[in-house]
Image (spheres, grey):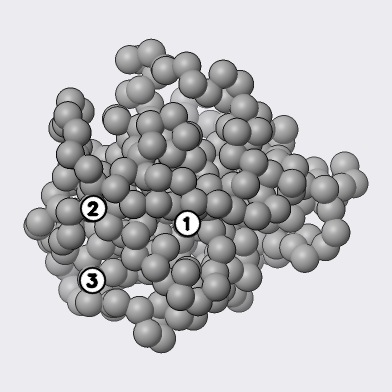
């Protein structure tokens, strides 16, 4: 593995993991450059690029946005000509060319998230690829899109047997566990995707934790992308990254408390040299379950 990161104090003990993630991101960037595919860092990864010129020191993941057409081109290239000896493209919730999110994983590595430890899936170190969708301008249509996106989020939580005691959410999850694994998944995906390529003022990322307001972004933020230094390489961020980050976090230069930091980390067990225990060939893994990280 190429050492891409600049040397810095490894106070959080995850330097090797971050370097592996950066190698994956560099590979994605190379494909995108060569094939005119656009992407940009999102969330905490974009914040890291601006505030830390790389990873947030305690961050153990990297997230990017792609528009549906760009992701389609990326997927097509990777499956036809990509480096499949070293990388594995994992799609979750895929149906009829639609997908909830994807992960590009490094084969010769392990990153196990505690609530997924018993799933028969590829558990390699990864970069998350989230799909940035058009969101309609009319309130009723946007509510419809948001409702079905959150249905998918809840169905994913139910499928991985996440439970919450009491309350409406607990009841909903319990009921969802009684339905087939992919119950209404295809319909819900259609409702999220149906507004793409329509004229509107906003993009959205409702397939996550964000609410209707916090998951909605003016398109002008993403009208184009630009490169910023990220550790020892450069990666793309939204053209108006400062406005995007301010909308997400307000004073985004302020560091979180130590208690807040605990909620930002995903990894439970990891190794950048040892592959996860193989239960079969890579083609035997079942990514058909629907899950959102």
Q: Report how far apart the C-alphas of labels 1 and 3 lie in the structure.
A: 18 Å
The 10 Å Cα crowd at callout 2, few under 14, some 14 to 19, many 20 or more, is: some
Q: Residue furthest bottom?
A: 80
* Residue at image point 74% right, 46% down: 220
Foreground label between 2 and 1: 2
Q: Report how far apart the C-alphas of labels 2 and 1 lie in the structure.
A: 21 Å
Q: Which mark is residue 86?
A: 3
Q: Which residue is mark 2?
A: 4
Foreground label between 3 and 2: 2
Residue 147, compared with residue 180, is above or below; it is above
Give x and y (percent) for residue 215: 65, 39
Which mark sits nearer the N-terminus, 2 or 1?
Answer: 2
Whether residue 115 is visible to the viewer of this picture, yes or no, is no
Q: Quadrant of the N terminus?
A: bottom left
Which mark sits nearer the N-terminus, 3 or 2?
Answer: 2
* Residue at image point 35% right, 15% down: 259
In the drawing, does residue 126 fall left or right of residue 210?
Answer: left
Circle 2: element type = loop
Between residue 159 and residue 272, name the one nearer to us: 272
Q: Which residue is mark 1?
A: 129
Contact? badges 1 and 3 (CB < 8 Å): no
* Residue at image point 22% right, 77% down: 85
In the drawing, does residue 117 fall left or right of residue 48?
Answer: left
Circle 3: element type = loop
């Amino acid at each position: 593995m190429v050492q891409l990161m600049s040397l810095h104090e490894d106070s959080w003990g995850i330097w090797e993991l971050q370097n592996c993630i950066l190698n994956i991101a560099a590979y994605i960037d190379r494909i995108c450059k060569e094939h005119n595919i656009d992407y940009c860092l999102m969330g905490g990864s974009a914040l890291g690029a601006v505030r830390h010129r790389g990873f947030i020191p305690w961050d153990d993941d990297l997230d990017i946005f792609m528009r549906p057409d760009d992701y389609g081109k990326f997927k097509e290239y990777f499956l036809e000509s990509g480096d499949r000896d070293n990388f594995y493209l994992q799609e979750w919730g895929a149906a009829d060319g639609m997908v909830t999110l994807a992960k590009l994983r490094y084969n010769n590595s392990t990153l196990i998230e505690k609530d997924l430890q018993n799933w028969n899936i590829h558990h390699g170190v990864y970069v998350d690829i989230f799909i940035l969708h058009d969101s309609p301008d009319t309130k009723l249509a946007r509510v419809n899109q948001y409702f079905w996106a959150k249905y998918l989020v809840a169905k994913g939580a139910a499928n991985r047997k996440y439970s919450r005691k009491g309350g409406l959410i607990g009841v909903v999850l319990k009921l969802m566990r009684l339905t087939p694994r992919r119950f209404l998944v295809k319909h819900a995906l259609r409702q999220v995707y149906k507004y793409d390529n329509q004229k509107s003022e906003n993009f959205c990322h409702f397939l996550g934790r964000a609410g209707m307001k916090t998951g909605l972004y003016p398109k002008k933020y993403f009208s184009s992308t630009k490169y910023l230094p990220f550790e020892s390489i450069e990666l793309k961020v939204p053209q108006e990254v400062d406005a995007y980050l301010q909308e997400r976090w307000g004073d985004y230069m302020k560091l979180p408390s130590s208690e807040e930091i605990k909620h930002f980390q995903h990894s439970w067990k990891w190794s950048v040299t040892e592959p996860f225990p193989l239960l079969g060939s890579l083609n035997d893994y079942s990514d058909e379950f629907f899950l959102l990280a």
